[in-house]
Amino acid sequence: MREKNWLGIVLSFTAGSRRQLSVSVLCAVLSVACGLVPYAGVYHMIVLFFGTNELEQGIWFWTFVCLAGYAAKLAFHAVSTTMAHQLAYNILERMRLRIADKWMSAPLGTVLNQSVGKLKSVIIDRVETIELPLAHLIPEGISNLLLPIGVFVYLLVIDWRMALASLITVPIAAVAYAVMMRAFNRQYADYMESGNRVNGVIVEYIEGIEVIKAFNQSAASYEKYEKAVESFKDYTLSWFRSTWKLMNFGGAVLPSTLLGTMPVGMLLYLNGSLSPAELTMCLILSLGIVAPLTSFTVFVNDAKTIEYAVKDAYGFLHLKSLDDAVERVSLPSYDIELDRVSFSYDADQNGEENSGTCHEALRDFSLKLKEGSFTALVGPSGSGKSTVARLIARFWDVGAGEIRVGGINIKQLPLSQLAEHVSFVTQDNFLFHCSLMENIRLGNPHAADEEVIAAAKAACCDGFIGKLEHGYDTSAGEAGGKLSGGEKQRIAIARAILKDAPVVILDEATAFTDPENEDKLQRSIAALTRGKTLLVIAHRLSTVKHADRIVVMEKGRIAESGTHDELLASSGLYRKMWEAHIGAKHWAANHEMEVGMDHA
Ligand SMILES: Nc1ncnc2c1ncn2[C@@H]1O[C@H](COP(=O)(O)OP(=O)(O)OP(=O)(O)O)[C@@H](O)[C@H]1O
């Protein structure tokens, strides 16, 4: 961590909960102070015991004082702990929200390039590990630090020699702990790495279970999983084995303060420096001085847990965001222009290469989409079609050149305004865990049910949704398994129809549509995108042959462009693609006929 240490980062999330933090710390201090009251009570009882006056009455009084002090200590501790837990959960909430915000404002690729397992592990599991240690660190950390200091001062007041004698075991235990902690940082790092490896293998095992089964790899995959779990166990045990002797030695020696206070106290008593009451009190106090210190190993561990969780979250908390303009801009038109755009997925967002082999997905690419026009992007796989679409939606920033909407560089528009103007439908049709009605309403959260249903009808969803038992109220989770790829795709199109944005980008959005519904869907898309700036990316050329302009891409550049007829006439790449497409269609039609005849 370069900028701040983990504690600084955690404290930066307490803004807004400073009162809670102060109350928790104050109650922890008061709890420690009240915890000293019983010691004072016991001391006075001993004094009374060795004296003769009013023993019975005094004993009752000091017993009450001891109990009251102890009760107050518990009460303050409870308040401090409760506040600390609330504070810890507030910190967790803020961290998770901040990370989610960062994911939204960072370039899409930065987020998508992370594995889902890692994203989930950091935001759910790692951040969660902060709560318990953090909640206990405040009250218990403070009392475990302040109590020994308070007791030591108390001993100093009685007799400084007894105070020093009470610390006799500290240097011996400190040496043991220091030897034990020598390699702690490295060992903890290895432990975390081993744990992360197990996590990674488990996530891979679960995510790839379909492939593992299909390719009969269960034995090999299970073996990898088993080995990772076993090596984690072996590492953990060997680490514990290497430390337990010193840890137990330190834990046994540290509280044995009587080794110092007993002989020194006896000598001081014999030479008249200590009264019997003072001697007894010193022996009691010395027993209480080191117990809190023994828990420091737990706190070192807790602090490491928090440090590692914060370190993991730090990467996400400091993701570089796309620059976002504040002021909305009034756009004179919805013309779109890509002006000499170059872009590489390997370059960072400053346009600098971050790998030795920087492959440009787009190179010096220029394209104009007139408002209200229908442009199709076609070309071989990997030629850069989706990249053009993603850059217009500003999922990434261009490396060089400019993209303008209505003549305004999209970097000067607030991201929310650009998102408002652009509907982007891809073939990854994610359904959220809510009803189908709500899934479509994502296109326009203010739309009435009737408007949602109208959009669903226009996207040819009404038929299959009507067949579901709960219709539009069917939850996507429940319906997900029953919906085909094409049906999910139409729900995504219904969302875009409802959004009614002036710029519509369809990236293979009709790829899964069955022949029966394709015609209907094409007509509804055509009707609902009329008057809009429309960019369609398609592999099936027949779906875009009516486009005002077809742009053929190859290796990140424009190979040719024109209308369907113009391109066919030019005998270029498009013509070859069209012939292959038509050939494939004929083959499919003939094949269907042959199969039909065989069955007849
Ligand atoms: N997220 C990514 N990270 C790194 N490289 C990528 C990423 N997405 C695409 N690329 C690369 O950029 C180039 C252009 O990809 P793009 O997806 O734009 O092509 P495409 O023409 O849309 O392909 P397809 O028709 O197969 O969808 C390809 O070389 C691809 O490997």
Image (cartoon, rainbow, N blue to C red):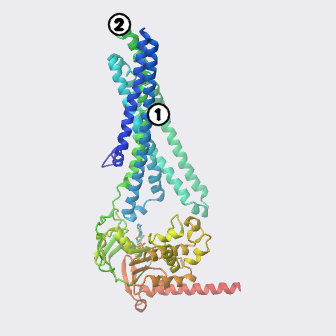
Q: Nearer the viewer, residue 516 or 343?
A: 516
Residue 457 spot, x, y in % from top left:
53, 79
The residue type indicated by label 2 comes to Asn
Residue displayed at 58% across by 74% down: 465
In the rendered structure, the answer to whether residue 488 lies left or right of residue 98 reads right
Label 1 sits on a secondary structure element that is: helix
Quadrant showing the C terminus: bottom right
In the rendered structure, the answer to whether residue 141 lies left or right of residue 579 reads left
Residue displayed at 36% across by 30% down: 146
Please say if 421 is above or below 248: below
Label 2 or label 1, whichever lies nearer to me, is 2
Residue displayed at 29% across by 66% down: 326
Please say if 428 is above or below 130: below
Residue 361 spot, x, y in % from top left:
37, 72
Mark number displayed over residue 243: 1
Proximity of marks 2 and 1: CB atoms separated by less than 8 Å: no
Residue 484 seen anywhere in this rendered image of the structure: yes
Hey, which quadrant is residue 423 in on the image? bottom left
- Does mark 2 have its CB less than 8 Å from ligand 1? no
**Residue occupying the far top of the picture:** 271
Please say if 482 is above or below 59: below
Please say if 366 is above or below 104: below
In the rendered structure, the answer to whether residue 374 lies left or right of residue 458 reads left
Residue 105 spot, x, y in % from top left:
36, 62
Hey, which quadrant is residue 414 in on the image? bottom left
Label 2 sits on a secondary structure element that is: loop
Q: Nearer the viewer, residue 594 or 162?
A: 162
Q: Nearer the viewer, residue 227 or 320?
A: 320
- The residue beneath circle 2 is 271
The residue type indicated by label 1 comes to Thr
Q: Nearer the viewer, residue 57 or 147?
A: 57
